[in-house]
Image: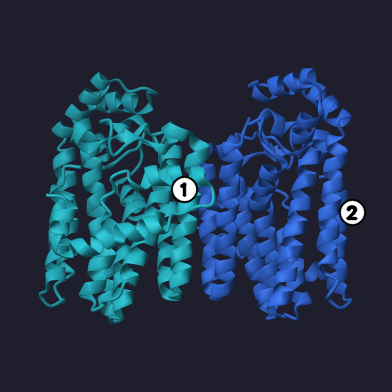
Chain colours: A blue, B cyan
């Protein structure tokens, strides 16, 4: 079950969203349009704009601005992925070559900047200062989270708290903003706005926890990422942090070696995965993700039953059960 | 004579600008503050915020917002330099190691993003949609100009028109926006606003023309850049474009070789410089820069005499005569 199946009743609006996405990406430089076309067709789930759409409807909004603002948030997300590709020299994303590998670092950085500009363009045109503020703040926190992640790279002392701060920044903040913008469009009370923001933040944390599990467990065909990318890049995600704190001195030195080696071999990866699983690093990360999904849905309790509320709950379940 | 000497009468406001720059760069991540501190002390001329300050005064504005908006534009400029460093793998800028060389591509990209966020934060807080629109549009054009430049890299067919389009985008657009924002703050007529924007655009083109001359002629101690950076990076700037169109087949093949070689030797650089000078590539580029400066100052004719008008004229002269 993928995200579009869950949102079948909103199919027409999601088609409309795709049109808006494309309509906002024209450029006077033909090469830009080529790259941008490649990037935006790169199979994104459109999780963030779909959340803006649903939360706006849940908040009583009926206009088109939710799709525009959702597209802007998707562009911010795309920009951060492009800049992240430079950082990681990641060879694949979602089963395709990254822009970085295809056209080089230069293009990834600048086309990322182009997406930022396009996003700002939409938000400025919409003209709601509160929406502008919420998105700008979220992107600042996102950026700080990514920088914090770099400073903790290969750091064996990384704690669970460091990790949660990093993923709250790099993933949850923008998902929280996507939901908060829906609430702002609907003009709901501050309390409801805050509830929807919290929903997005908790959902985002769960989403990243599952992502980090899949980086260890998913086969490359399924997840579109070479297995063990995080380990290879020296990223200490929760499965590994738990393993480090729970394993024997001998196993810890195996992890340490795999983490600092430039090219972790498949054999080394399998060895680390064994340790992570023995220490229940995978199981407990999923458990924690489930906890955040529960918090997310609990936060919706004050909203009266509706199709939108139900869809948000199903998205929360999808975040836990997804295989890619 | 440097820019601050020219603006002596505005010394207090320029000191105030520095305070605003620093006050807007705090971060919850200590490492971000370290890098940002290094970057912003990197000896920038503050040309753009100074232009916003002067054009706002010329337009009758007396508040503090010109300094805030100027700082935001300076941050946009800083972000683009940081992203440009990733692109060029430039080892030095303004006589110091680049952020890229010091902390790696990852940090350059993300700290660049941080500067963009800070800039947007200021502009959103200020809340003037027209200013937001002008700056956002300028940054889009800047980004497209930089991408166009990459696509023309090493391209022997690059024309003078291509080159002018590139530098209008990557340099002049934001300088034009800096001046236009000053006019907007002063609430002048559309005609005057347009005049000040044109002043900035023409000044910006002249500025980049001189920059591209200095890349060939300035000694490293003076300009803070290793001589011949553009040649080494395969950038065809006007001095070289003129030389290619005017030189013999033999000299053209020397240029071609130097352009595509990975590590141009000092000897090769000196050889190319000889050809460029023989073809009067330097002289005619300076001539063109002077033409743009003349257009810039002519465009001020409709403004009545004032200290600010005089200062703008002196800045235009400085752009031509500067040695770094």
Question: Dot 1 lies on which element?
Answer: helix
Q: Position of residue A203 (x, y in %)?
A: 77, 57
Looking at the picture, does residue B203 appear above or below residue A54? above
Question: Dot 2 lies on which element?
Answer: loop
Looking at the picture, does residue B45 appear above or below residue B278? below
For the question of whether residue A79 can be seen, the reply is no
Mark 2 is surrounded, within 10 Å at the Cα level, by few (under 14), some (14 to 19) or many (20 or more) other residues, namely: few
The part of the image, by quadrant, that contains residue B196 is bottom left
Residue B112's label in the rendered image is 1
Q: In this rendering, would A305 be left or right of B224?
A: right
Tag 2 residue:
A1
Residue positioned 75% across, 31% down in the render:
A228
Q: Position of residue A311 (x, y in %)?
A: 85, 67
Q: Position of residue B4 (x, y in %)?
A: 18, 55
Residue positioned 88% across, 39% down in the render:
A283
Q: Position of residue B68 (x, y in %)?
A: 36, 66
Mark 1 is surrounded, within 10 Å at the Cα level, by few (under 14), some (14 to 19) or many (20 or more) other residues, namely: many
């Amino acid at each position: 079950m993928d995200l579009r199946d869950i949102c079948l009743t909103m199919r027409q609006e999601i088609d409309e969203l795709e049109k808006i996405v494309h309509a906002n990406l024209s450029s006077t430089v033909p090469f830009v349009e080529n790259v941008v076309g490649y990037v935006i067709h790169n199979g994104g789930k459109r999780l963030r704009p779909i959340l803006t759409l649903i939360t706006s409807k849940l908040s009583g909004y009926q206009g088109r601005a939710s799709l525009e603002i959702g597209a802007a948030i998707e562009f911010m997300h795309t920009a951060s992925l492009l800049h992240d590709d430079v950082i990681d020299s990641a060879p694949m994303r979602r089963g395709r070559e990254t822009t970085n590998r295809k056209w080089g670092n230069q293009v990834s950085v600048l086309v990322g900047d182009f997406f930022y500009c396009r996003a700002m363009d939409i938000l400025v045109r919409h003209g709601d200062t509160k929406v502008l503020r919420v998105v700008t703040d979220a992107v600042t926190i996102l950026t700080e989270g990514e920088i914090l992640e770099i400073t903790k790279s290969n750091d064996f002392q990384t704690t669970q708290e460091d990790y949660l701060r990093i993923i709250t920044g790099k993933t949850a903040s923008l998902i929280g903003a996507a939901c908060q913008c829906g609430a702002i469009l609907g003009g709901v009370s501050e309390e409801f706005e805050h509830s929807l923001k919290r929903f997005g933040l908790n959902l985002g944390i769960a989403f990243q926890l599952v992502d980090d599990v899949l980086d260890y467990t998913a086969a490359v065909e399924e997840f579109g990422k070479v297995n063990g990318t995080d380990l290879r890049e020296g990223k200490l995600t929760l499965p590994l942090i738990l393993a480090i704190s729970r394993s024997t001195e001998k196993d810890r030195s195996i992890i340490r070696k795999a983490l600092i080696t430039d090219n972790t071999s498949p054999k080394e990866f399998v060895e680390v995965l064994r340790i992570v699983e023995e220490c229940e690093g995978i199981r407990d990360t999923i458990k924690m993700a489930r906890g955040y999904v529960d918090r997310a849905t609990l936060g919706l309790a004050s909203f009266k039953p509706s199709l939108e509320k139900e869809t948000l709950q199903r998205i929360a379940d999808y975040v836990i059960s997804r295989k890619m």
